[in-house]
Image (tube, rainbow, N blue to C red):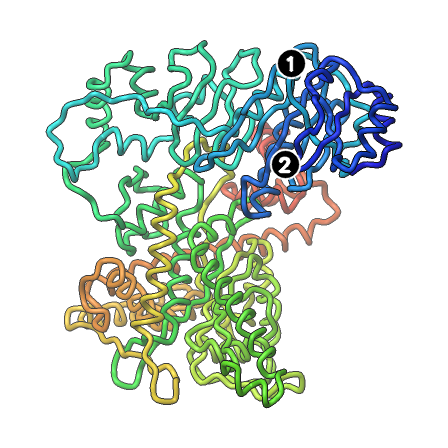
Amino acid sequence: MIKLEKARQLIDSNLSLIPIGDSKIPWVKWKEYQTKIIGKDKFSEYYLNDKTKGIGICTGYDNLEVIDIDLKVLKVLKEQQDFWNELISFLKDNIDDFDNKFVIYKTVNNGYHILYKCAKIEGNLKIAKLKGHKEAIIESRGIGGYVFVYENQVSKNSYTEIKEISEGERETLIGCCKYFNYTEVDIIAQPIKTDFNELSIKPWDDYNAKTSMFDIVGDEFKIIKTLSDKYIILRHGATSAHSGYVYTNSNCMYLFTTGTSYPHEKLTTPFAAYTIRYFNGDFKAAAKDIYNKGFGSRIVKEPKELKEKPKLKTEDLIFPIDIFPEQIQNYILQCNTTLDSSIDYMGCAFIWMSSVMIGNSLEIQTKVGWKENVNLWIAVVGKAGLGKTPSINNIIFPLMKQNNKEVKQFIKQNEKYFEYISKDKEDKKNTEIIRKPVKSQFIVNDITLEALVDLHEESDNAIGVFKDELAGWFKDMNKYRAGSDLEFWLSSWSGKSVSLNRKTAKSSFVEKPLIPVLGGIQPSILNIFYTDENKDNGFIDRMLLCYPDLVIENYNDKEMSTEVLEWYSSAIIEMYDTIKNQVIKRNIEDEIEPQTVKFSAEANVEWKRIFNEITSIQNSHDENEYMKSMLPKQKSYIPRFALLINTIDGLFTGQGNMLKVSKESILKAEKLSKYFIAMAKKIKINTVEKHEIKKTLDLNTNKSNKEKFAILFKENPDLNRTEIGEMLNVSRRTIQNYITEIENGK
């Protein structure tokens, strides 16, 4: 209870105080103090009475009103904090100079009181109640009410500094609070008679699942605030603070405003909004229209099958995504059309992710004495800002979550282990035996070789290396010496056992290393490492390079449904669990014994053809000698691709024999290999061109940029305008001006 002296100061500030007894109930007749103040002497007498357990303020007097946020409705502290942070942020966004206009105190139950005065106030109101809760989480205390006085001041102003706000500001305050209220309302009826059976996906249900409400009403309403379960929207041109909201879970709209063709105070589905807007409320006509556009089905689709396959021009499909099951193709295309993610980057990320999951569980035998694992090294090449990492993350995020889960589980189990071993002998007798946990982390980013080998000893199926930028990793390979990083990596790529004998490392040995690498690199940096030395030692030839022609896209309003994301995430986790629990086989010493996969008879015929065609190119006088060096590595990569593709297809379709590579899988592997060969040639041409340009520039350092460009343009009129502009440090427009002047003889 606040001190008497402070209470008397509140009376001096024109606050009507009353004594509060047990259960926060006044023990005096207090209604009269709604209209007058207790004198300080009389109040002091009440204050000193044993019945008094606290002090209250009569609301309603002098136009005082209080918003009471009762967070004890929420049982979890974090939920309470999140709700308050969301509410206060919402209020500050909508009421100018909020911090100077309102007084806020925290209650003993982690709730809050927001105090203010206004010429127009009301009686006590229940403003907001959450779904599944009987008690209101936000109420007001006005005419005929009171609130307890607390000492935990949150705002800059105190009880003695309560200010008057305008009626408009009060309306905004109450309106913001109302947006947290859950209202039980009926969805607009859709009176359509159809011949669909019970198990069909109805066109309107399909439309609601696939269509964002903002695809329909986005030109009439804008989002002004995002809450945990809804978007707050405002009609364009409206003078009110808000018009309604769109629920994030149901995608339905609820409006307060009557200034639109859509119903107010009713829940409106996307299909209902579509019908009202384009068919004047004729649901039957609207249903026929969306059915003709492909919504709905007559056969129930399996839960794992995506419902929509975006259309994309064939010429845009540079990466051969038809090597994947149709469900994965659909997901990649969804990401491409809604998030502008690169198909090439995503395709590379998927085969890398699959190699990490499959790891040492399977190996392919091309012939007796020659086996390959699924190890891949992939560098996605592109300038900064082209979305290399976001595209990759769209694919690998489920596995990254699983990896983080494994890390957390290890930390938790390790803590239990150390707690156990710290006990004395007697305590251990009555305690559960805790074994030392084995590290199960399988994806790393920045890690030393010593730590990598130590981790791989324990997490023995595979360790995936994913780095946003591969420049540092490339740099470590730049010197070839005994015991170097390069020597280690070249051995691991081939599946040869590796060990580290450095002073800083303990005895580290991995018999079957499998360390797939994925990361991004900028073309200018890659050119530095694309050297004869790295060709000679075989490092560059082992890299699978992905360098698509991309541009930075404008903002894309298309939205991917949460259903698609949830399906993809669960499908990848299911794939991971299946491999971990069913595909991986261990011997009596708990070591992984890879299952051997072989070519089917038809696949073996195709493999011999592919092998011989590559050999012919190697022996040809028409192929560039520089490019020939990568072909032997493709003879290793193609069986690896075939094993990956065959396994992925088997896991997703449940068909075929995962221990027998099909003809289709080897043909898809050939297609993927040709893609990476083409990319390597593209980068080689780009590198040679840049080296030639740089040589010319170095020989003409005393000339102006225009003169340098004129020399280059004369040698090669088709040179890349953007890249030469970067090398001269001028804009593409300047380069175009140079060309115009040169062609005009200036």
Q: Position of residue 258 (x, y in %)?
A: 44, 10
Q: Nearer the viewer, residue 579 or 738?
A: 579
**What residue lies at 50% left-to-right and 68% top-to-bottom?**
409
Q: Which numbered dot is residue 27?
A: none
The residue type indicated by label 2 comes to: Ser
Which quadrant does the C terminus fall into?
A: top right
Q: Nearer the viewer, residue 497 or 39?
A: 39
Q: Is residue 347 left or right of residue 154?
A: left
**What residue lies at 52% left-to-right and 19% top-to-bottom?**
234
Q: Nearer the viewer, mark 2 or mark 1?
A: 1
The residue type indicated by label 1 comes to: Ile
Q: Is residue 15 above or below residue 378?
A: above
Where does label 1 land, which residue?
Answer: 121
Q: Contact, CB < 8 Å: mark 2 with mark 1?
A: no
Label 2 – label 1 distance at C-alpha: 62 Å
Q: Is residue 346 above or below residue 358?
A: above
Where does label 2 land, which residue?
Answer: 731
Q: Position of residue 302 (x, y in %)?
A: 22, 48
Which quadrant does the N terminus fall into?
A: top right
Q: Quadrant of residue 209?
A: top left
Q: Secondary structure at mark 2?
A: loop
Q: Quadrant of residue 446?
A: bottom right
Q: Is residue 514 left or right of residue 642?
A: right
Q: Position of residue 189 (x, y in %)?
A: 27, 21
Q: Quadrant of residue 677?
A: bottom left
